[in-house]
């Protein structure tokens, strides 16, 4: 084991354990602002440690199972954060919508834009399989339309909300679509989602991780995920106060959550792009967007049974415009199966527009 690998193992082991210990100490107490600020690095470290251990397991099982595992791990964090924050006394009726929409925009524009730009600049063209990537994009579009756009136009309930029956249908449809895609990606047409292993450090490394390391990482992954959710619940009051004190819209809370949980995913995708494994980067991006909708909405639908207050899922007019622009640009990007730096720049500009308009709507 190299010195770098040894140091990585040390901090990814100690941080989740330390986070769990701190969580047990401060849970149920009224932490002051100084304590909340001190917990931020620990929370961020637990997030990175969780994704590291998911990557260890993913490295063992190979693609596309690795990307799928990373997406599910990130979504578990996201769902936990949303549910925990929705238990606060403040109005959180739009928190789930804003967080899921932010995750979609970060994945489809931020991560995809970075992957394409880095790969195209470093390797002249970013090449990928349009059949697999197109299937992933189509699934994301369908999920977003059913769960985020249709509530805006449904008439059975006043406002951009689903009735209980409509929410149940959207939840079941989301799970069915996600399950169909996972079956396609991992069983039926797995070859459409495999990267080209040009430099010998991709899917050929699946056996370099021992079974003992995999079991160890699985255990620490669970500890890290529990710690992240718990610490986020403690931090929720501080996040909301900071957003209010800055005079920012409440939707920024959802953006902060999405940025937090997707930051490690973004790094992993960009690293893959730098190795000219664009397909892996796109698998991570579209898989995370898909899981953010296909797993979060059903979880929120179940949680709404005991959560008080309305659940607003319908996007605003401005959000629908941004989503529509993203859909058109994404289709034009995916169809050729290869991309120049321009396509990456287009997606990043759309992401910048989303971020700016979230602060200045």
Image (cartoon, grey):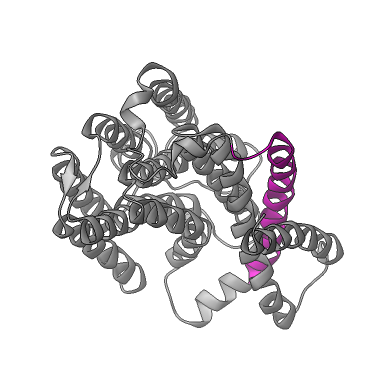
Name the one closer to the observer, 159 or 240: 240
- Principal SS element in the magenta part? helix
Q: Is residue 84 visible?
A: yes
Identify the residue at image location x=31%, y=50%.
276
Where does the image place residue 212, in percent across and percent down from the top left? 74, 38
Identify the residue at image location x=63%, y=45%.
307
Q: Is residue 220 above or below residue 49?
A: above
Q: Is residue 297 visible?
A: no
Q: Residue at the top extreme?
A: 188
Q: Is residue 6 above or below residue 160?
A: below
Quadrant of res 279: top left
Identify the residue at image location x=73%, y=61%.
10
Residue 47 shown in magenta = no
Q: Is residue 123 above or below residue 148?
A: below
Q: Quadrant of the C terminus?
A: bottom left
Q: Quadrant of the N terminus?
A: bottom right
Where does the image place residue 71, in percent across and percent down from the top left? 49, 42
In magenta, the rendered stretch is 208-237
Q: Is residue 134 above or below residue 223?
A: above
Identify the residue at image location x=64%, y=72%.
40
Please give the count of numbered marks on the rendered protein: 0
Where does the image place residue 330, in percent across and percent down from the top left? 21, 46
Residue 220 shown in magenta = yes
Where does the image place residue 168, in percent across and percent down from the top left? 49, 27
In-image side of 120 versus 276 (left or right): left
Name the one closer to the observer, 205 or 118: 205
Name the one closer to the observer, 64 or 256: 64
Name the one closer to the observer, 187 or 106: 187
């Amino acid at each position: 084991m190299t010195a770098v690998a040894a140091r990585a193992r040390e901090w990814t082991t100690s941080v989740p354990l330390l986070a769990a210990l701190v969580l047990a100490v401060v849970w149920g107490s009224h932490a002051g602002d100084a304590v909340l600020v001190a917990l931020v690095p620990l929370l961020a470290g637990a997030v990175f440690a969780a994704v590291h251990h998911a990557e260890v397991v993913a490295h063992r099982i190979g693609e596309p199972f690795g990307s799928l595992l990373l997406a599910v791990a990130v979504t578990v964090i996201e769902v936990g954060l949303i549910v925990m924050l929705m238990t606060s006394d403040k109005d959180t009726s739009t928190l789930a919508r804003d967080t899921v929409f932010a995750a979609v925009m970060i994945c489809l524009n931020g991560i995809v834009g970075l992957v394409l730009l880095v790969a195209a600049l470093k390797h002249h063209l970013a090449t990928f399989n349009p059949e697999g990537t197109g299937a992933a994009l189509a699934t994301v579009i369908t999920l977003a339309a059913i769960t985020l756009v249709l509530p805006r136009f449904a008439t059975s309930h006043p406002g951009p909300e689903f009735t209980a029956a409509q929410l149940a249908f959207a939840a079941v449809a989301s799970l069915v679509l996600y399950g169909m895609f996972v079956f396609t990606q991992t069983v039926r047409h797995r070859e459409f989602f495999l990267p080209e292993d040009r430099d010998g450090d991709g899917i050929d490394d699946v056996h370099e991780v021992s079974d003992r390391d995999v079991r160890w990482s699985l255990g620490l992954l669970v500890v890290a995920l529990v710690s992240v959710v718990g610490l986020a619940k403690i931090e929720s009051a501080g996040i909301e106060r900071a957003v209010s004190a800055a005079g920012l819209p409440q939707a920024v809370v959802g953006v902060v959550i999405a940025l937090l949980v997707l930051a490690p995913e973004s790094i992993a995708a960009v690293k893959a792009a730098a190795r000219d494994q664009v397909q892996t980067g796109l698998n991570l991006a579209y898989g995370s967007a898909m899981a953010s909708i296909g797993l979060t909405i059903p979880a929120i639908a179940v949680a709404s049974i005991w959560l008080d207050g309305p659940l607003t899922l319908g996007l605003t007019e401005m959000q629908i415009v941004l989503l529509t622009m993203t859909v058109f640009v994404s289709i034009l990007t995916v169809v050729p199966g290869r991309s120049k730096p321009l396509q990456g720049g287009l997606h990043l500009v759309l992401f910048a527009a989303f971020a700016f308009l979230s602060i200045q709507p």
